[in-house]
Image (cartoon, rainbow, N blue to C red):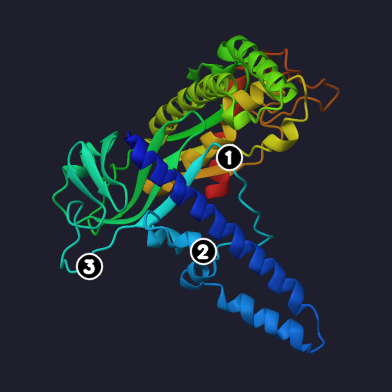
Amino acid sequence: MRIYPSDRQKKIIKINSDASRFIYNEMVAINKELWRLKQVKLPIDTIQNRIEQLELRQSAKQMSNHFQFLEDKRIDSLTKAAFRKVHTAGVPKFHRKSYVWRYQTNCQYLKQKAAYLTNGTVHFEDSKHVIVPKLGRLRVKGSHQRVLARSAETRIGTVTIVKDASGRFFLSMQLASDTPFVNWPQNTGKQIGIDLNTENFLTTSNGDTVANPRYYRIIKGRLAKAQRILSRRARRAKQEHRPLRTSKNYQKQRLLVAKLHAQVFERRRDFLHNVSTTLINHDFVAAEELRSKNMLKNHALAMSIADVGWRTFLGMLAYKAELYHRQFLTVNPKNTTQACHECGFVMGTAGTEKLTLADREWTCPKCHAHHVRDHNAAQNILTKGIIKLA
């Protein structure tokens, strides 16, 4: 949900965001130091004492006792306890200071026997206002109206407050209920395969195509001009030995650039949500496996591939399939473009040449079936998906 905090509330959000980042980085530093100290096999008293000190500080209460500025009454106590050991693999990285603010708190149901959206420490006052600890009353706007209309018991869990790089504030809630939030649609028996390409966004095995909106290309000229101005203002501020965070002209231009980036992101996300929701109405959806990282190495297609958002799209299909009790699979795209859907003949064999990107239509030399390249690929993907599903 979009929120509209006052200047006082913005300061509190900033303080909590800074405290959350500091505690996270301190915990990461403690973990790294403990790991290095425990590599020393010798029972040295100094090392053992240091390990004990660090292990004692691995709690929100001890952290507050050690760093007095964390005792600020404007800091949410649940924010200080938000560090989680969620890194099962790899080494966690420090969170750096940025224009994005973020912190988390929790909704508590202290004496209530039943949990609703209107009786926790975080709760809706009415359809346009929400109460959050330390912040107080916030005006909200977004997709919460449908949830508020529920009469079923609904518990609010983790609450996240975020300010993005363009200066907008958002609030998100994790909700839980014994009553499903989404009604599962009935099975239709429909199956579909999709071929993703740069000419159009996708082609289905039914022969339908979805045009590629190319949101980044549309705004590319305006964005390049705005970024050139931003670069000049940054250079001028540095020449005059002024920090960028206090340079008003630089900050105005930075917000403009951030808003252009946000515009592209939101338009693309809205488009991907609409297309993925439409496709998931089929009982079974098959798509090709994509290795976007390798594809981006092709400098001629890198911009088009990054602009289209294939990886995000496939992720949406995956979680929506689970949400709506549908089946979604990705298949190896090998020969899906070169093989004839009718007879299975593969171009590039038996003395024939492989199809190139310029060959949008072709005729099979074996069975003489005429194919539209992308439609044929989508049919092959669906066939592979059905075989993999079986």
Compared with 254, 383 (above or below) is below
Q: Nearer the viewer, residue 297 or 43?
A: 43
Q: What is the crowding at mark 2: few (fewer than 14 residues within 10 Å), some, or many (at least 20)? A: few
**Could you tell me the amino acid type at mark 2?**
Arg
Which of the two marks, 1 or 2, is nearer to us in this view? Answer: 1
Instruction: Check the image and name the residue furthest to the left.
Output: 151
Q: Position of residue 164 (x, y in %)?
A: 48, 35
Q: Which residue is mark 3?
A: 110
**Could you tell me the amino acid type at mark 3?**
Leu
Q: Position of residue 180 (x, y in %)?
A: 26, 52
The secondary structure type at the circle numbered 3 is loop
For marks 3 and 2, the one nearer the N-term is: 2
The secondary structure type at the circle numbered 1 is loop
Compared with 283, 89 (above or below) is below
Q: What is the crowding at mark 3: few (fewer than 14 residues within 10 Å), some, or many (at least 20)? A: few
**Could you tell me the amino acid type at mark 1?**
Ser
Q: Position of residue 12 (x, y in %)?
A: 39, 46
Q: Which residue is mark 2?
A: 84
Q: Nearer the viewer, residue 322 or 19?
A: 19
For marks 1 and 2, the one nearer the N-term is: 2
Which of the two marks, 1 or 3, is nearer to us in this view? Answer: 1
Q: Which mark is residue 297?
A: none
Q: CA distance from mark 1 to mark 2?
A: 21 Å
For marks 1 and 3, the one nearer the N-term is: 1
Q: What is the crowding at mark 1: few (fewer than 14 residues within 10 Å), some, or many (at least 20)? A: few
Q: Position of residue 28 (x, y in %)?
A: 63, 62
**Observer able to see residue 324:** no
**Observer able to see residue 298:** yes
Q: Which residue is mark 1?
A: 98
